[in-house]
Image (cartoon, grey):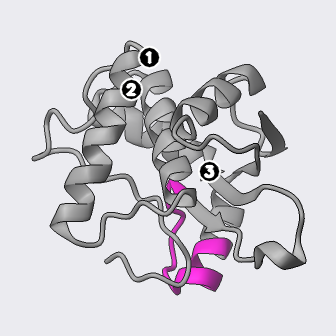
């Protein structure tokens, strides 16, 4: 079972909690244990502040992932971590990339959930594995391949603080 805490700190339009739950459950499907996570929806100012604080980058990125780093013996809850999603950046990227907005949201949420499970895209082999899983999960939901036009589409900017992705 998924315990999802959705925090809305943005005035911009965003998907429903039911949509976030569906996308998270899909992204976490391989995990058999209960899961607890937070998604915080932010505007560009908060997104920029967090990206600057944790990654030393002075811009708002689409998604930041914060995996829980608490030893199991200290905490008896299935805490996965947090995703922070910058709503205006997601909307702008979808428009710039010619993608359906809900498909882009689904991709970024699933991508972020996979980061919380330990997937990464630092090297080519890891990126291929993660992207293949994203394609599979999104296809099951009826969404197109988010990497179909790789010349014009960057890998999601979901970053895990503490790891240098750029």
Residue 10, image x, y percentages: 76, 45
Label 1 crowd (10 A; few <14 / some 14-19 / many >=20): some
For mark 2, what is the residue? 138
Label 2 crowd (10 A; few <14 / some 14-19 / many >=20): many
- Asked if the residue at tag 1 contacts the one at tag 2, i.e. Cβ–Cβ closer than 8 Å, the answer is yes
Task: Check if residue 61 falls in the magenta segment.
Answer: yes
| The C terminus lies in quadrant | bottom left
Query: Which residue, as the protein is rendered here, is positioned at the far top?
Result: 142
Distance, label 2 to label 3, CA atoms, is: 18 Å
| The N terminus lies in quadrant | top right
The residue drawn where x is 73% and y is 23% is 16
- Name the one closer to the observer, 53 or 31: 31
Residue 150, image x, y percentages: 14, 44
Q: Which of the two discs, 3 and 1, sits closer to the camera?
A: 1
Q: In which quarter of the image is residue 17?
A: top right
120 in relation to 62, above or below:
below
- Name the one closer to the observer, 59 or 165: 165
The mark found on residue 141 in the picture is 1
Q: Which of marks 3 and 1 is nearer the N terminus?
A: 3
What range is drawn magenta here?
50-63
- Asked if the residue at tag 1 contacts the one at tag 3, i.e. Cβ–Cβ closer than 8 Å, the answer is no
Q: Is mark 3 on a helix, strand or loop?
A: strand
Do we see residue 41 in this rendering? Answer: yes
The residue drawn where x is 78% and y is 72% is 72
Q: On the rendered structure, is 34 left or right of 57?
A: right
51 in relation to 83, above or below:
below
Do we see residue 14 in this rendering? Answer: no
Task: Check if residue 148 falls in the magenta segment.
Answer: no
């Amino acid at each position: 079972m998924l315990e999802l805490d959705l925090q809305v700190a943005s005035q911009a339009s965003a998907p429903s909690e039911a949509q976030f739950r569906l996308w998270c459950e899909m992204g976490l499907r391989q995990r058999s244990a209960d899961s607890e996570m937070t998604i915080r929806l932010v505007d560009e100012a908060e997104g920029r502040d967090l990206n600057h604080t944790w990654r030393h980058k002075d811009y708002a990125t689409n998604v930041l992932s914060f995996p829980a780093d608490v030893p199991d013996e200290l905490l008896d809850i299935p805490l996965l971590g947090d995703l922070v999603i910058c709503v205006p950046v997601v909307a702008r990227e979808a428009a710039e990339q010619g993608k359906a907005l809900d498909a882009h949201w689904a991709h970024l949420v699933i991508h972020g959930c996979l980061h919380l499970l330990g997937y990464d895209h630092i090297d080519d082999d890891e990126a291929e594995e993660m992207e293949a899983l994203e394609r599979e999960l999104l296809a099951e939901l009826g969404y197109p391949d988010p990497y179909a036009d790789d010349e014009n589409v960057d890998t999601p900017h979901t970053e895990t603080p503490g790891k240098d992705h750029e």
